Amino acid sequence: GAVVSQHPSRVICKSGTSVKIECRSLDFQATTMFWYRQFPKQSLMLMATSNEGSKATYEQGVEKDKFLINHASLTLSTLTVTSAHPEDSSFYICSARSSVGQPQHFGDGTRLSIL
Amino acid sequence: EDKVVQSPLSLVVHEGDTVTLNCSYEVTNFRSLLWYKQEKKAPTFLFMLTSSGIEKKSGRLSSILDKKELFSILNITATQTGDSAVYLCAVDSGAGSYQLTFGKGTKLSVIP
């Protein structure tokens, strides 16, 4: 149980492109989903928290107009990196949690490379 | 500011050895401590600990929490090459939407 699917797993695109990443909870309803960014040999850095049906809460230093998050249903959240630039290249990971007090379960991540 | 510190940062052992990974924390409104294993992709959930002194076990892995000392350990007995990974400790601090604060991880390498 507790499977989270993230798609795509790898994106390579040109600078200026917008990239959409999907995160789905396959066998449970996720009231809250989280988006993280991970640089090489670093731990996960929380970017934003999204609750179904409401606006995402962004961490300090994360541009909400740059990283658009939509959590339209209890099983799907999307992260759109708008007008991506090389400095946005990173490993993006989503997680989902069924309710407060339950563990977060992670997707397999998306490696984004902006040329 | 919430803080999670893991040690050692990296460890190389031979197959069959037993290892102990450490995690200390300083957070407000502690709810739980979680251990994850990260190989090439995203972390996979191992344990969630909420109470002191109660050991959680799964096969060769076990973990325990000491809320007085603000500390947890993850033990792996009879290590195998498949145990090679980065082990992440995270604390659910109960702030806001109960977010996780992660340590930097311990990179474990098990050699034959």
Image (cartoon, rainbow, N blue to C red):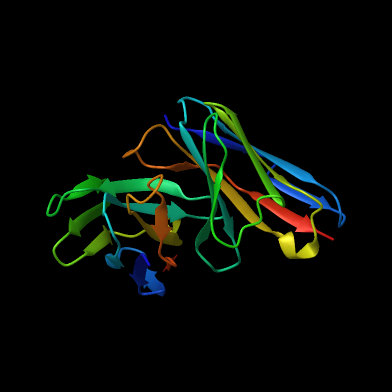
Going 85% across and 49% down the picture, which residue do you hit?
Answer: A17
Residue B103, given in percent of the width and then of the height, sits at 40, 65
Quadrant of the drawing holding the N terminus of chain B: bottom left
Image quadrant where residue A63 sits: bottom right
x 16%, y 50%: residue: B55
Q: Residue B71: horizontal and vertical position, in percent?
A: 22, 65
The mark total stands at 0
Decide if residue A40 is on the left or right side of residue B99. right
Residue B78 picture location, percent across and down: 29, 59
Compared across the picture, whether A76 is left or right of B28 comes to: right
Q: Position of residue B69 (x, y in %)?
A: 16, 67
Can residue B8 be seen here? The reply is yes
- A29 sits to left or right of A114: left
**A2 vs A99, nearest the viewer:** A99
**Residue situated in front as seen by the camera: A53 or B55:** A53
* In front of the other: B79 or A24: A24
Relative height, residue A114 to residue A49 (above, below): below
Position of residue A20 relative to residue A3, above or below, is below
